[in-house]
Image (cartoon, rainbow, N blue to C red):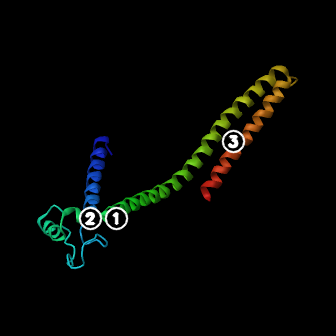
Amino acid sequence: MQPNRLGRVLGITTRLAAGKIREQAAKIGEPDAPGTGSSAGTNSGPTTGVRPGAGAARSVGAQAGTRAATTGPSAGATVADGGRRLLRGAGRFGSAMAKPLAHAGGILVLQVTGVFFGIFAAFFLSHAWQTGRATRWHDRHAEVYLGLGLLFVWFTVSSFWRAKRKQRG
């Protein structure tokens, strides 16, 4: 996807989501919500879904007394409840995305580590071979290089083996 197109799509999606959130907040703030302090006979009809700024909602607000009476502390609490639900959903989304990414990342780290161990193994084995041929294997450095080379070969093999095991399970 082109960068400009991606930004446009994300911007449009964000604006649409913000509009939906505003709609839901307006529905929550209507006097129909339980515990708003209005009497039972004031608004017994069903919620029409009209925004509070529209004519039908104004007449309902006028019947309840003032506009401040329609958005009491319980309306704010329900909006905060919606925010908590949004955060909880975002957390669930994050955990749902984090587990597969962490699994794939762990496998990738083991493979990259194996490659680096392989580079060190090649370095040590190469130097062991050069030092051994030059001194007819009478130098202790050749033995040290050979030992370190074999150790890093083991690290390389075990790292790729662990990555394969992690990928299966």
Task: Inspect the image, locate mark 1, and give the three-letter code of the amino acid beneath it.
Answer: Thr
Q: Secondary structure at mark 3?
A: helix
Q: Quadrant of the C terminus?
A: bottom right
* Disc 3 + disc 2, Cβ < 8 Å: no
| Residue annotated with mark 1 | 78
Along the polypeptide, which appears first: circle 1 or circle 3?
Answer: 1
Along the polypeptide, which appears first: circle 2 or circle 1?
Answer: 2
Q: CA distance from mark 3 to mark 2?
A: 62 Å
User: Could you tell me residue 147's position as x and y percent?
Assistant: 80, 34
Instruction: Find residue 157 and name its label.
Output: none
| Residue annotated with mark 2 | 29
- Quarter of the image for residue 65 reads bottom left
| Residue drawn at (20%, 69%) of the image | 49
| Residue annotated with mark 3 | 156
* Disc 2 + disc 1, Cβ < 8 Å: yes
Task: Report the mark closest to the observer, 3 or 2.
Answer: 2
Q: Secondary structure at mark 2?
A: loop
